Image (spheres, rainbow, N blue to C red):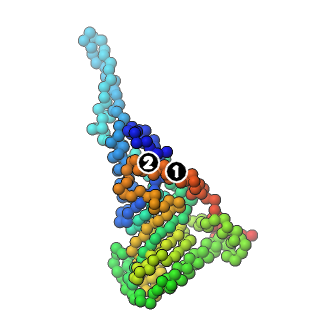
Amino acid sequence: MALPKLIKDAPTVWNYLNGVVNLYKPAGITAQQVRNTVVHNLCRDLNLLNVRPALQRVVIEDGFDSSLVVRKEEDLSDNVLVVGPRYQPEDVKTRFCANHGKFTSGVTVLGINHGTNLAFRLQQNRVLRVYRITGFLGKATETHFAESRVVARATVSHIGSEKIGRLLASIQASHQRKMYELSGIDIQSQAAYDLACGGTIRPADNKQPMIYGLRLTEYRKPFFTIEVHAMNETEAYLGELIHEIGINLKSCAHCVSVRCIRHGHFTLEDSLLKKDWNLQNIISAMAHTNKLIKKYPSMLIQTSSALQTLDTSVD
């Protein structure tokens, strides 16, 4: 439910601040910096609203006629000038569904307050994420990213878009075979067909990266951009993927940019830009994500097939 603009009472607004929000993370900043910025903006906007008054304390004094006078007055120990603003960063609980690295930009799903439980369920369900990754052919770096030192150079004149496309198809096929090998199923069997009909095959180990789709979207030598559908991936793994593509092309390459364009059903179109990370926009975005989760409950409850452990056999 969206927050009515007429509400100026901070405790009422705080009750709305529970859910997950789709943010656009810029490249060059860490996930912790994103969290700090969001929490700071939320506390700032909450403290600008009508916060609760200071607590009252009972004072007993002597009256003029030897009687006691009981009255209430403001408890200075609860005054904002003494204890600070009513809403502090420590009051806001947060959890990311996926911790993107410093060089990754794009869709970032963040759970706030009670939404941290929802974020945990989204993370454990391991939905697909889609990336657009740009690589640079002809140079290799220490960390496989552009910010580190160049350690090797190679020619790229022999590389064409057809050659890259064939290599990406081969990498995708090898990952698909690996899914069935880990589940102990022959890829040519009926059991493999039944498993594939169940939906996206998820690895049982959430630390096992898996690529489900890989294609070339743009090639402007020496730059090339690929679209990757993956699960359990990390920024370092995607950088290594670009490095391996360069080696397999009889050259070398490093990663220039990584952008997450989709996380499950969360897309770039619905992401909040950094300038919109404020209380009103975040609560409105939470209302939209709640509708999205209700529309696609499979993001929370895994109904598709999952990989089995290595020691499991299929009759």
- Going 34% across and 28% down the picture, which residue do you hit? 56
- Identify residue for label 2: 283
Side of 214 where 42 appears, left or right: left
- Residue 149, image x, y percentages: 33, 78
Callout 1 amino acid: Asn
* In the image, residue 41 above or below residue 86: below
Residue 185's quadrant in the figure?
bottom right
Q: Is residue 34 left or right of residue 190?
A: left
Is residue 160 visible in this depiction of the protein?
yes
Residue kind at label 2, given as amino acid type: Ile
- Residue drawn at x 45%, y 77% as measured from the top left: 218
Along the line of sight, the residue nearer the viewer: 198 or 5: 5
Q: Which residue is at the front of the view, 161 or 300?
A: 161
* Label 1 secondary element: helix
User: How many numbered tags mark residues here?
Assistant: 2
- Does residue 14 lie above or below 168 as drawn? above
- Residue 314, position in %: x, y? 71, 69
The 10 Å Cα crowd at callout 2, few under 14, some 14 to 19, many 20 or more, is many
Q: Is residue 113 visible?
A: no
247 vs 96: above or below: below
x, y percentage for residue 206? 55, 64
The residue singled out by tag 1 in the image is: 290
